[in-house]
Amino acid sequence: MTEANYLAKIGDKVITAEDIEAAINSLDQFQRQQFDSEEGRKRILADLINQELFYLDALERKMDEDERFVKEMELVKANMLKQYAINSCLASAEVTDDEMLKYYEDNKDKFVKPETISAKHILVDNEELANEIESKLKKKEISFEDAAVEYSTCPSNMNGGDLGTFAKGQMVPEFEEAAFELPVGKISSPIKTQFGYHIVVVNDHSDASQAEYEEVKNDVKSALLYQKQNEAFMSKMNELTDKYKDILDINK
């Protein structure tokens, strides 16, 4: 191995750039940002070197033969083997296209697209200003988008007040109730919520509808696979309970 192939070498152990990247990728998003720099990579390299030095010291001191360590490793090994066996059982569950289609047909009520609206809003702190803006909008003295940019205190103001598409249960009740009752294209009167006063316009309103199979195929697969994995798990548990019934003693 040439010098270019590794960043550090401790005895026979080498640390490569791939090891650094693997260490970074194992971190959560916030930590990853902290170490995703040249300085951050140096810190990780130093940490990996330190770990290897401690490992060598532990071997030299025969800490791997310590009774407490051996017991802990046996416990870790047992737990890993248990989870490996469970995962192996779950992996035996498979779904076919025919099974997926049948599951969809038998459970169509689970695959319904909810009622949604696409809306924009303008949020202000007081009712007087809200009434003034409503009047300007209805007199067409200003466009809804321009009014949102000029008056709205919501971050959506930079997008002309656009809230995107949403279903029931995603907004505060007072806002939601009024918005879903509002005819498409009509500008609402001020709606009071805990955030202030909203003026709303609905651009599109879609009723709840049955999702087509191709639209929810991945969801169908996930739901069916979860069901079959549960069945495989319970079947295996029953098999093992019967197999080891002579040594299984549940103290009730």
Image (spheres, grey):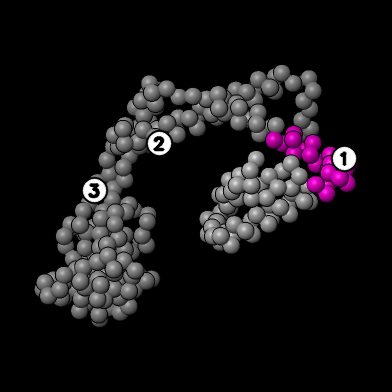
Mark 3 belongs to which amino acid? Answer: Ser
Q: Residue 44, can we see it?
A: yes
What's the residue at 55%, 24% (across, down)? Answer: 92
Residue beneath label 1, please? Answer: 65
Q: Earlier in the sequence, mark 2 or mark 3?
A: 3
Q: Nearer the viewer, mark 3 or mark 1?
A: 1
The image shows residue 118 at horizontal and vertical percentages of 25, 55
Residue tagged 3 = 206
Residue 77 position within the rendered picture, expressed as x and y whole percent measured from the top left: 74, 35
Q: Are marks 1 and 2 in contact (CB under 8 Å)?
A: no
Crowd around label 1: few <14 · some 14–19 · many ≥20 (10 Å): few
Q: Quadrant of the C terminus?
A: top right
Depicted 102 relative to depicted 80: above or below: above
Q: Quadrant of residue 100?
A: top left
Cα–Cα span, label 3 and label 1? 68 Å
User: Does the stretch in magenta take in 79?
Assistant: yes
Q: Amino acid at mark 1?
A: Glu
